[in-house]
């Protein structure tokens, strides 16, 4: 049963009625602007939550939010456009190795990574895939023999096992937020491993803020 991870960016006008998110699936919501009610949870700017249901979305004020979805490949996306709602699908990528019948357990993580001007993340891998989104600044991702810059409001995918070197903007701070699918054994633990032995003990310029470490069912 193939899966994919998606990132949606949605704007919702303030209104008394909630908007359903479509079929129940694992999702992470993160508020970019305004204030949002996700089911019975209220989120302000820089707030995040997980839902495995089909929650109703209501804007407390005109709001923009990100929504990551883990869905079966080819299934229609959740809320994109309806009355008072406009949105776009930023990225969809296949996720391999997820099999409900193999007994493995997984979690969905949301955290953010911040860099000072000129900071970098030395060549590294992760234990699972995920989609990143630049909140401020910009960052260049060097992987698979190519370098790709990503500015504010842009997203990119990392498979996990493919090595990545990340170079942040040299003039201003950079911060991105991400959602990843990881082994359940990593609850509360970092997923990063450095590829080069000489980098492991170097001071690291990036800092992290954790939002969600949610065990999930496929």
Image (spheres, rainbow, N blue to C red):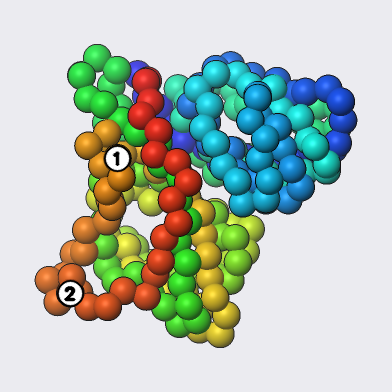
Q: Quadrant of residue 63?
A: top right
Q: Which residue, as the protein is rendered here, is positioned at the far left?
A: 197
Q: Which residue is mark 1?
A: 187
Q: Name the quarter where the N terminus is drawn.
A: top left
Residue 165's x, y, as percent? Answer: 33, 68
Between discs 1 and 2, the one toward the N terminus? 1
Q: Foreground residue, 15 or 130?
A: 15
Look at the image and tell me in which quarter the C terminus lies. top left
Q: Is residue 99 visible?
A: yes
Q: Is residue 34 left or right of residue 204?
A: right
* Vertical relation: 202 (above or below) 25: below
Q: Residue 15 at what x, y percent from top left?
A: 87, 30
Q: Secondary structure at mark 1?
A: loop
Seen at 35% across and 44% down, the residue is 129
Residue 159, placed above or below residue 203: above
Q: Quadrant of residue 3?
A: top left
Q: Label 1 crowding class (10 Å Cα cut-off): few <14, some 14-19, many 20+?
A: some
The secondary structure type at the circle numbered 2 is: loop
Vertical placement of residue 182 versus 2, above or below: below
Proximity of marks 1 and 2: CB atoms separated by less than 8 Å: no
Of circles 1 and 2, the one toward us is 1
Residue 201, numbered label: 2
Query: Which percent across, then down, holds residue 201?
Result: 17, 74
Which residue is outermost to the bottom? 171
- For the point 27% across and 56% down, the residue is 192
Q: CA distance from mark 1 to mark 2?
A: 23 Å
């Amino acid at each position: 049963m193939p899966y994919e991870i998606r990132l949606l960016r949605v704007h919702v006008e303030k209104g008394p009625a909630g908007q359903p998110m479509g079929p129940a699936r694992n999702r992470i919501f993160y508020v970019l602007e305004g204030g949002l009610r996700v089911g019975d949870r209220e989120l302000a700017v820089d707030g995040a939550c997980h839902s495995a249901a089909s929650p109703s979305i209501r804007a407390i004020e005109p709001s923009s939010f990100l929504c990551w979805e883990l869905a079966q490949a080819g299934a229609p996306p959740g809320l994109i456009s309806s009355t008072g709602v406009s949105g776009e699908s930023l990225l969809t990528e296949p996720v391999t190795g997820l099999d409900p019948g193999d007994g493995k357990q997984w979690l969905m993580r949301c955290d953010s990574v911040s860099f000072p001007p000129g900071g970098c993340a030395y060549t590294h891998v992760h234990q699972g895939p995920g989609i990143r989104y630049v909140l401020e600044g910009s960052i260049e991702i060097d992987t698979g023999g190519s370098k790709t810059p990503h500015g504010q409001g842009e997203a990119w995918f990392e498979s996990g096992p493919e090595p990545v070197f990340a170079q942040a903007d040299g003039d201003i701070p950079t911060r991105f937020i991400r959602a990843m699918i990881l082994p359940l054994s990593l609850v509360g633990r970092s997923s990063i491993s450095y590829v080069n032995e000489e980098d492991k003990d170097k001071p690291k310029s990036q800092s992290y803020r954790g939002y969600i470490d949610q065990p999930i069912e496929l």
